[in-house]
Amino acid sequence: MTDELMPKLLVSDADAAIDFCTEALGAVLTTRVAGDDGVVHHAELTVGSTTLALAQSVPDWGWHDPASLGGSPVLLTVHVPDPDATADRMVRLGGELVIPVENRPYGKRQGRVRDPFGHLWVISGALR
């Protein structure tokens, strides 16, 4: 049985994505592995109790970032104490507000932000 799932986001600029995640989400970089050419093939960040991996897109390996494919088919949900502040910070750091953060009828305060690398984030928290 599986006891861990670690999503790995492919991005056009791994170091910029690491900076974005640390500043926007308070992530902590725990591992960064780059080739001799400086290309980051694997980085791990902790976001709360979750580990998130990042890597530079490498088309020759079949690793494509969302922009190279015309967008992302995946929604990443992050639960935070203040979804409004988190979404605002993500936008200030280069993200795009896709759906405003509002109280939803299903009992959560949520919105959606596209990060500068094309990934879609659902920013979620308690109603206010």
Image (cartoon, rainbow, N blue to C red):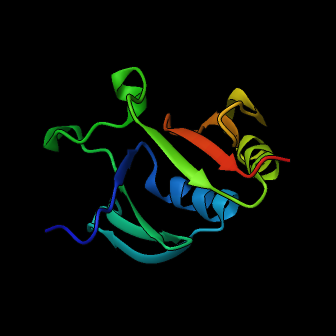
Q: Position of residue 122 (x, y in %)?
A: 59, 40
**16 and 84: which one is in front?**
84
Residue placed furthest toward the bottom: 30
Q: Percent from the top left, x then y, of residue 65?
A: 36, 37
Q: Nearer the viewer, residue 126 or 13?
A: 126
State left or right for residue 116 relative to residue 15: right
Compared with residue 109, is residue 98 higher up or lower down, i.e. above or below? above
Q: Residue at x 17, y 39 (%)?
A: 62
Horizontally, residue 23 falls left or right of residue 114, namely right
Residue lying at the far front of the rendered structure: 106
Residue at the image point whose x is 53% and y is 47% from the top: 77
Asked if residue 6 is positioned above or below residue 49 in the image, the reply reads above
Q: Name which residue lies at 13% across and 68% down.
A: 1
Q: Nearer the viewer, residue 56 or 6?
A: 6
Please name the residue shown 64% across and 34% down the image: 112
Q: Where does the image place residue 44, in percent across and percent down from the top left? A: 40, 70
Front-most of 42 and 114?
A: 114
Residue 97, given in percent of the width and then of the height, sits at: 71, 30
Q: Relative to 28, is 33 on the left or the right?
A: left
